[in-house]
Every structure is written in structure tokens, then in C-alpha cells.
Image (cartoon, grey):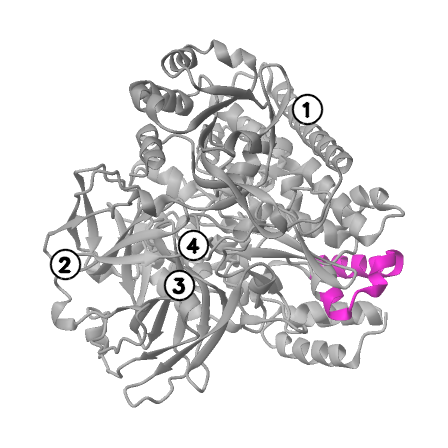
Amino acid sequence: MVYTNEVQEYANSKFCDMLEICGEKKEDILYKISLCNEEERFLIKYLYASMNVHDIFSYDFELFYEYVKHAIFLRETCTWTYKIPEDIFLNYVVHYRVNNEEIEDCRKTFYDMLNYKLTNKSMEEAILEVNYWCAEKVTYKSTDERTASPLTLLKCGYGRCGEESTFTVTALRSVGIPARQIYTPRWAHCDDNHAWVEVWCDGEWHYLGACEPEKVLDKGWFTSAASRAMIIHSRIFSGYFKDEDVISNNKVVTTINNIRSYARSKKITVKVLNFRNKPIKDAKVTFQILNYSEFANIAILNTDESGKVCINIGLGTVVIHVVKDKKFMYKVVNTKDLDEITFNINEFVYSEEEMDTIKTNKEILNKTNENINEEYINLENRNKISNGQDIDIIPPSDKKAVYAHITKDEELQHKERVTKCNTIREEKYTKTTKNILKSIDNIEKYNSKMKEILLDSMENYNEILEFLRWSYNSHKFEEAISLLSCLKKKDYIDSKANILTGHINNVVEFTGDYPKEIYFSYVLCPRIYLESITNYREFIIKYFNNNLKESFVKKPIEIWNYVKQDIKELKEYEYEELYTTPVALLNAGIGSLMSKKILFVAICRSIGIPARINEIDLAIEYYDNGFIKVEDKAKLITQEVIINNVSQSELKYFQNLSIATLKNGVYKTLNLDQNIKGNDNININLNSGDYRILTSNRLPNGGVFVKKYTFNLRAEETKVIDINLRDIKISDMMENYEIDDLSIKDKNDNIVNLHQLVKDKKCIIIWIEEGMEPTEHILNEMINNYKDFNDIKANIIFILKDIKALKNKTLEKVYELIPNIKTYFDNSKENINNIARRMYLDPDKLPLILIAEGLKTVQHSKEYINGIYATSGYNVGTAELIIKIIQGN
């Protein structure tokens, strides 16, 4: 292929720049690139031109060369690759990285498994076929934050949405189809996030659900949800692209704004001025939304020479947080009502000593819009506890999804195909499980915990089994069991036996200077944070001379001083979602702050010092009769905080409660595991400083009633704080969602349309899962309130899986006390899934309860069921709430 002069000049120029940070790898790269032919040489240069430091130093040249060879092969053999523009081909077919996954030589593996399925298919048909294949291999399952590689997902058969989308993008790129991961960092209307896939097909970008095949493109359960997003983005690991809306970028990654493809949006301008009304350059402007009861970042930009940032964003409530020189302010605004907002930050110089205690600045703000909620903290009032400030969060409004029409026959074929995909995947799981059990049968040394670990390892079980057999034969079985027990479930599916063996062979022996559980968890354990597990101990032990290691053991803080001095940060060359391995970091001398923290812990553990990254605040700590924070050793005295929940409702952390600490003008949420029952309290110990507590009550329509409390904690004081959860009125809970008609069956197996049942008056429709606790709970609540259910003016409809459910004793009692209940049947999950997704609920949590209020006529006189309220799963007080909604109280 002939590439334009423009892209060749870009690759050559940026490649030369990148070589300057490659250190000892520079000569190796130049030599090996000289052995390539012309096209290979250009493509290798293109990849290295924008490569982050993690990838440069963590992977060998040969790995990237395999990606280049496969891309050239695709260009020569795949018919549709000839019509792909060069920037699209380079960034979304050639490029090896999708997000923050481990990079492995996998393209040919995927190609060989897929290519024969695509013979004589159009580009669109091939895309749809690839997604069916992905569904045969992988299904959704919640996992930890570390992104497993596509090859790992092939082994285990499951992954979270970020992993499913990485897997699907890899599959598509392997057969020459441009693809990228699309991501909303947090939903505005519910506590979650999501990732899916976009594909370039015949000149345009289209979307699809990863491992969630459909008969057509631009269809997914998340379509309506995406229409309510505040931001949707993708990433390009290159600086060469065309016609994209850039949110932010550095030298190795660009974040692209894709919101306009999915939701109603507008361009918002934020202007930051000093007290002379002059623009402030390089102020950090963070856009946040309320999610998991914290203000979560969705975009971070820096002001330009004119003191401005601009962003296309959804139409709803956003928190705009501005920081400059550790001073901050923020405003809560509804983007629907404004186009521009100005921040006036008063210039005030703090000494370093003052900055240790003063985190906020005294500011005078002019209220510029009645829809703006402004915060400022006066210095003289910083020691007072706020009584709580009410903040109303309004998410973007709903937009009903419209999909390409398919016939009933096509829909039936699609359902059969999905069923076949599920069967293939489940059969593979069953076969793997049998193989594992057969491999460990009659081996007494494998206790129940080890059997559980081996079953969790799926197709990686041979690696775990090899490690266990080695440890048993080497009389190190106790250490092996302890090592495996401190790993995460995901580690079992991609850890290698030789790496685990290396950690056992090179670990410092237990001396009895601290408890053995501390030794196992914080010396022996190879897992530190979210990095890939590597065999770093032997290298580290040899890297430092004995005198230096002895000094480190005597004074562990010197390890951090060494790391800070020896490892420099080049943020412009970092992708912050990646963590450079300890060995690569020592060799390169370049790495991110978190990579350096991981290295600190790795050095400590390698020389026998228990150490960790604290999960609460991500501080590095070493053990000496208790864990000691390295960076804030002088501030380790903690104070007691008593938090009283004066509401009737339980406050659950990261559901309707969070606590954040103020550091350098930024609130960082603490990762606490603290729930507070209604009218109860908890005692927690916190370092001195400034804090913010948020309580949040999310409405069924996605809005949130927030209560914000701020306080300062001084040394040697106890703070008592009363917090509350804002009340929700019935009127706040109502919504109007258009729901398509659906078919169910009556007792005589006749098909009945739901339209027929709801057109006359309000309906209470409950999908029952008889015998299960959440369903039993709502049925018992109905029994306790049976008189009210007999009196309300609404149809009550129970939808059961089959007629056998009628034998359930609790159901029998409900029918006896409330005889007007109408019963229908539906043994498929499709209706439950469609209704739950439309009402923004979890379809896997039954019972599903929908209150519908007649029919709603919209464009072209089409009638929809009008859903006004819904809930799913276990919820106390639902029966009484239903009665109030129907009665309009």
C-alpha cells in the first residue's frame, strides 16, 4: 500500500522524537527496524511514534512486528480493507492497543478462528457474524478493575463490559474491520458505567453491543441509556487522525468525544479569570457527575491562553471543578440552561507550610445564573461543620431508541442463533470443568480451597496445577497455597506457573518478626495493585548491592526516596491506565506515580519488608508494628470522627454515601467499607485535613437528591457529625417512558398483548420468581396490605414462568386474599429484559414490578404503554409504595 506523504512525515518525525526516551532500547529498535522492508518499516515507525513508555519498555520489538505483519497480510487479502481510509486503517486495524489490556500476540489466533466464517460476506454481514462468534466465546460477568487480555477471555469465557468490548474490537481488527471501544465513564441516570464497540463500515461508524449480537447494526440494550449520557468517548493511541472532536490529548493518547452520535448535546464554554478579570492559563477544569454517591470525573481539561475550555456535553447537571495552584472552587450547573460559565479565582499566595493545612481559598463569587449552585469555603469558617447543602441532580431526558426494522422470521432466526451461541459457550464451560475435576481426582493434597481455585482458573488450570505439583514436590506446598489464596480470582486465569514459582523461589524466608498472615499477604504475595503479575523478585535482589539493601531494611522510607530520585515522570508520554512493571521501570527510569508506588512495594517485599498500597486512599505503607504511611509520616496521628445517621434509611457506602478528603484542591473519595444503619452511628479514624460527605437519594427517573457536608479535622480532636438522607415525594418518583407492546399467554395458552390489558386503567404488573426471597418478600407485603390492594383502582397482573408456579404456598395465599389478580405466563427472558432496560433497571433482579398508566400516543399515532414507575429485586416497603402511587398520595 502507498501511504501519503503527510502520514509518512508524521511517522518519521514523531518516531525520532520517541527514540529520545527509549534509552537502552534505542539501538535495538533501530537495528531491527533496519531489517524490515519498506512498508513494515513505516508501520513499525507509526506504532512507535505515539507509543507510551509502558509499552516501549514492557514489550519487545518482535511483538509489534507481529501486529505489523498481520496488518499487511490483511491489506493484501481482505477485500474491504482497500476502501478503508489510511488514518482509519492505521488507528483501528493496524494498532495493537484497544484500551489498557495486556498486549499479546493474538491477531492471527483470532483470524484463524474467524476467517472461514466470513467467506463471501459483505462488510456489514461480516461484522454481525463476528459478534455472534464473540457471543459463542464470551459472556458478561462482573470482575475486578484489571483488564484481562482477549486471549485470557478466550480461556475463561467471561468478562465485564470493558473486557468484552476489548475482546470484540480485537476480533474485528483481526479480520481487517476497523473497530474501537466506546465508553461512558459513568452514566448520569444510574450508578454504573458501560463500554461497547463502534465499527467503521462502508464509510460510516456504527455501534454494537460487545458479545451481544443483534440482527442489525446500531442496536443494543444501552441505546436509550446512551441518549441520557453526559459524555461518551473513545481513545486513539496516535496523534494522526482526521475530523474528530478532541476532549484532551498528550503525546501518546487522544480522548475523542463521541457524545453527539448518541445523545442531545451542546458546546459549553468555561472561562477562568483572576481578580483583575484576566484569563488564567493551565487551570485544571474537571467535569463531574454524581455516580455511586460521589462526584466522579468524566472529563479533565486545561484552560488555554484565553482562559477557556470548551466541551460538547449532554443536557443535564454537571459539577465543574476548577483548580489552580492548589486553590479550587466548583459550581453545579444544568447545561441545558446555559452555554458559558465564568469562574473568578482570587489570586492568593500560600507558603508551603500554610498549604499543609489550608486547602481552600477565600473567594467572593457573583451568582451568574439561577441554575448555578456555587460553593466557596471561607477560611474563618473552615473549622465549622456545615449543616448540609441540598443539591439537585437532573440527568438528561430519555430518548426512545429507534432501530432498523426486521421481520418476524429474521427475529426468530436471531433468537435461535443467540440460543446456539449460549449453548456452545456453556458446553465449553462444562467440558473444561470436567477436565479440571478429572485432573485433580483422587489427589488428597488438593483441599476444597485449592479445588475452588483450580475451577476458577478455567483453561489456565494446567498452569496452576503445574505450580501446585512443583510446590508439593519441592516441599513448599504451604507457601504455594498461601500465595494463591492472596491472589484475586482473575489472577488464576492468566498467571503462569514459572512466574509463581519464581516468587516462591526468591522470597525472603519468614523470620517471625511479624505475624505470619502479614508475611503471606504483604511479603510473599506477588499482587500489589492492578498491574500484571511479573517475576520481579530475582531481578530486584540482584539489582541492588547488599549495602544498599541493608540500608533499605533499616530505613524503608529510603526506598521511596530512591524511587522518587531515580525514576522520573513524563506525563506527556504516559497513558495513566497502564502501570509499568517493576523490572521495566528500573531499566527505563521513567514511569507514572502509580507505577513508582508499585515499584516501592515490590522492592520492599523482595527484601523482606511487608508493604502495601492502602486500598482506602492508595497511599504506600510499610509494616513496623503496624502499617506506616511513607509519604505522610508526619501526619499519621489520626482523629476519631463519629458520624450519626439521623435518617430512617440505611446509608450504604458507594450507594448513597461517600467521604472524600481534600488534597491539593481536589476531593478524592476514600475507599471505605462503612455502612450506617438508620438512626445509628459509626466511628472512623481519619487523618487531619478537610473532608466532604455526600449522601444521595436516587429517584426512579434517574435524578438524585444530594446532601453535602464539609468539615475540617484538626489534630487531637473528636468530631461528631449528623448526616441525613433527603426525602423523596411520590411526585418525584413518577416518570413517563414509552414501552413497546409485548406478548404473553393466558391460562389457555392464547397469546395476549399487554396493550389490551393496560388501555383502560392503571396496571400493576409483576413478573414473579416464585420461591425466591425477593419475590416472597413482596408477596408477603401484599398479604399484609391485602385490604388496600382489593380497594385500589388498578388491574393487578401476575406474570409467571409456567403453571407450576401456582402451587407456591405464598402465591396461593395472595390469590386467596386478593382474588381479582389476573394471571398470565411468560417463560422467556426477553420481555423482562426489554421492560427492565427501558425502565433503567437490572433485568437479572426479580421480581420486576411495573406500574403502567394506560396508553400513550406519539408520532404517527403509534400507541405505547406508558410506564410511570418500576422497581426490581429486593426492596422493603414496595407494597405500600405501590398503593400510594396508585392512590396518588
Q: Which residue is mark 4?
A: 603
Q: Could you say where residue 862 lies in the image, as x and y percent from the top left?
A: 61, 45
Q: Which residue is mark 2?
A: 385
Mark 2 vs 1, N-terminal side: 2
Label 2, secondary structure: give it.
loop
Q: Which residue is mark 3?
A: 318
Q: Mainly helix, strand or loop, the magenta region? A: helix
Between 682 and 606, the one lying in front of the other is 682
Label 1, secondary structure: give it.
helix
Chain part drawn in magenta = 61-90
- Left or right of residue 307: residue 392: left
Are the residues tagged 2 and 4 within 8 Å (C-beta)?
no
Residue 390 vs 609, above or below: the answer is below
Q: Mark 4 belongs to which amino acid?
A: Ile
Q: Could you say where residue 376 lies in the image, as x and y percent from the top left?
A: 23, 70
Q: Mark 2 belongs to which amino acid?
A: Ile
Which residue is located at x 10 percent, y 52 percent?
Answer: 718
Residue 274 vs 387, above or below: the answer is below
Q: CA distance from mark 2 to mark 4?
A: 42 Å
Disc number for residue 431 = 1
- Left or right of residue 718: residue 160: right
Q: CA distance from mark 3 to mark 2?
A: 25 Å
Q: Could you say where residue 384 lies in the image, as x and y percent from the top left?
A: 12, 62
